[in-house]
Every structure is written in structure tokens, then in C-alpha cells.
Image (cartoon, rainbow, N blue to C red):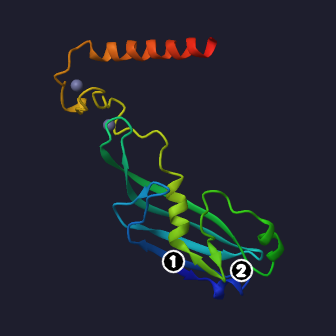
Amino acid sequence: MKLDLHEIASHLGKRIHSDIDEPPIEDAESGVKCVKPVTGEITFNNTGKHIVARGHFETTIEIECSRCLKPYTIDLSMPIEEELQIPGHTIEVLEEQELPEDEKEPLFVDYVLDLTELLRQNISVAVPIKTLCSEECKGLCPHCGKDLNQGPCGCPPDAEESAFSALASLLEEEENKLES
Ligand SMILES: [Zn+2]
Ligand SMILES: [Zn+2]
């Protein structure tokens, strides 16, 4: 959703309120995959140089467990706090300013706010780096690939150990190579 903020941008002290109701946002690049609409509310307040946006939103995102590769969902409930520079006051600053890395699209162009992009940025910072479907996730067997959360696989019980020792001797070889 795009919001036209012309009206508020030209009236100091003006405040408007808007409900958020976005269809599920998906963006593979930033790992954002909502499985529910994004709902909430946002208030814009013209403070002179900025339009201050404050509010909150809720959604549910789907992520993949880094151990067992199963998708699982987490509920998000997040605050929104954003300062949008009103063009005209700070044109030069805006031109010199480099966009932060996670900001692949400018949010606020010609007094129009890209609310979907603002929400995507907020959600992307909430995606955990280390994803685990549960603290106790057993992951996949390194040999047969079976999901060990569903029970043990048929691999010999010492398989894991020998895999580790094989890895260890490989590492040792590498080290020896580096030393010689
Ligand atoms: Zn898992
Ligand atoms: Zn196995």
C-alpha cells in the first residue's frame, strides 16, 4: 500500500491515523515470508522537518529451521517508529545521504510513503539469523538425511562419531598441508 502524505506534509502539527491491512508480504531476498496479512495501525505527525510515523503491526512469518530444514512459523508483534524527512527542508542532506543497506527502495518519494516497503524492512530485521524450530531440534541424520525428530534412523549408532573423527582427520591433514 502506498500512502499519499501531501496533505500532512504541508500542515505543521497535523496528525493523521491510518489502519494497516496489507496482504502477506513476501520477499525472498530478505527472507521475509508472511503467511498472514499484516495488520495494525499507524499515526503520522508533522513535526516540521519530519513526519514522525508511530504505530504497531502484527503478522506471522514462516522461516526454515536451520537444523531440520522444516518450515515453521513465528508470530510477530512489532512497533513502528520512523522519521520521514519532508522534502524541501532537507533536499541537500537527502542527496548526500546513503541509503542503509537493508533499504533497497527509498521509502518516501514525492510525499508518497511506500508502506509495504516500510513493513518489509521492519519484518526483515525480525527474522532470526539462527533459526530453530525448537531448542531441542535433533536435525537431520548426516548420513541418510532422516529427520531425527521423528525417531532414530537405521544408521549404525557409531555413525555420527566416525563422521566426526573422519572430519577431524581431514582437518588434521589440511593443517599438516598448511604447515609444510
Ligand atoms: Zn528443526
Ligand atoms: Zn541415518
**Percent x, y of residue 88:** 79, 82
Question: Which residue has dot 2 on it?
Answer: 13
Q: Residues within 10 Å of mark 1 (few under 14, many from 20)?
A: few
User: Which residue lies at the image location 38% right of the left edge and 49% below the top edge?
Assistant: 63
Residue extending furthest toward the front: 180
Task: Quadrant for residue 166, please give it.
Answer: top left
Residue plotted at (66% across, 75% down): 45
Q: Secondary structure at mark 2?
A: loop
Mark-to-mark CA distance, 2 and 1: 17 Å
Which residue shows up at 29% across the image and 31% down it?
Answer: 140
Can you tell which mark lies on residue 140?
none
The amino acid on which the numbered mark 2 sits, given as a three-letter code, is Gly
- Alpha-carbon neighbours of circle 2 within 10 Å: few (<14), some, or many (≥20)? few
- Relative to 16, residue 76 above or below: above
Question: Which corner quadrant holds the C terminus?
Answer: top right
Report the image quarter containing ligand 2: top left
